[in-house]
Amino acid sequence: NAGVTQTPKFRVLKTGQSMTLLCAQDMNHEYMYWYRQDPGMGLRLIHYSVGEGTTAKGEVPDGYNVSRLKKQNFLLGLESAAPSQTSVYFCASTGLAGNTGELFFGEGSRLTVL
Amino acid sequence: LAKTTQPISMDSYEGQEVNITCSHNNIATNDYITWYQQFPSQGPRFIIQGYKTKVTNEVASLFIPADRKSSTLSLPRVSLSDTAVYYCLVGGYNDMRFGAGTRLTVKP
């Protein structure tokens, strides 16, 4: 099993451009999450999904949109990128309901906005 | 308000036991406590999880007092490769928020 796969791993954008980050998991997990991590900082939750067709806002949702059209995929979109969105983005998933889920993380996607 | 509070950094030496404490005064009845380890340029990885009392696995122990308002991750006999950031996470599937973490540096 590949686990959680993020694409692309690196991307450079110009201010105002749009892009989509793809997160794919092959563990049949219900719950998926997008985080951003700025240099020297902890992870901040952007959006999450508790199942196919559902999404919800996390701590820092502004400037991002998400979709969960298929259970295995969770997409993070930037409609008009800003330099403040330069960060490393991590996707995670868990398969257990309630409070006992271990999060499985992808390797991260490093985004630079010029 | 932050859900969890941890020391920003800790230093240790190889072979010592390291204890990292996390405060979570507003923990809910159904919340579990989970600890993660993160190396540079990698996603966090699971270390240990518990609900109350003590949990031990092959890499760490987790101590949780009766009031569950704090928890302590114990790493026995650390090595240089344990240098990383350690996060405690408290909450359910709809509140998977990480705190700032503790940067542990193990020295030779």
Image (tube, coloured by chain):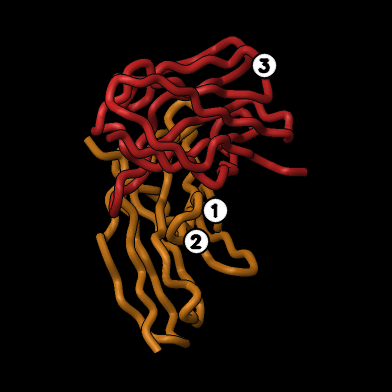
Chain colours: A red, B orange
Q: Chain of mark 1?
A: B
Residue B46 image position (x, y, % from top left): 56, 53
Q: Is residue A49 above or below residue B96?
A: above
Q: Residues within 10 Å of mark 1 (few under 14, many from 20)?
A: some
Checking the image for residue A70, the label placed there is 3
Q: Secondary structure at mark 2?
A: strand
Q: Residue B71: x and y, percent?
A: 40, 56
Task: Please state which of the two labelled residues, at mark 3 or mark 1, is closer to the viewer.
Answer: 3
Q: Quadrant of residue A84?
A: top left
- Callout 3: 10 Å neighbours few (<14), some, many (20+)? few
Q: Amino acid at mark 3?
A: Lys
- Quarter containing the C terminus of chain B: bottom left
Assess whether mark 2 and mark 3 are in contact (beta carbons under 8 angstroms): no
- Discs 2, 1: same chain: yes
Q: Chain of mark 2?
A: B
The amino acid at mark 1 is Arg
The mark closer to the camera, 2 or 1, is 1
Q: Is residue B83 above or below residue B47?
A: below
> Which residue is labeled 1 in the image?
B45
- The residue tagged with tag 3: helix, strand or loop? loop
Question: Residue B62: which numbered mark, if any?
Answer: 2
- Image disc number at residue A82: none
Depth check, front residue: B29 or B58: B58
Choose between B68 and B19: the one closer to the eye: B19
Asked whether, in this view, residue A39 is left or right of residue B17, the answer is left
Callout 3: residue from which chain? A
Tell me the quarter of the picture where residue A101 sits: top right
- Position of residue B79 relative to residue B37, above or below, is below
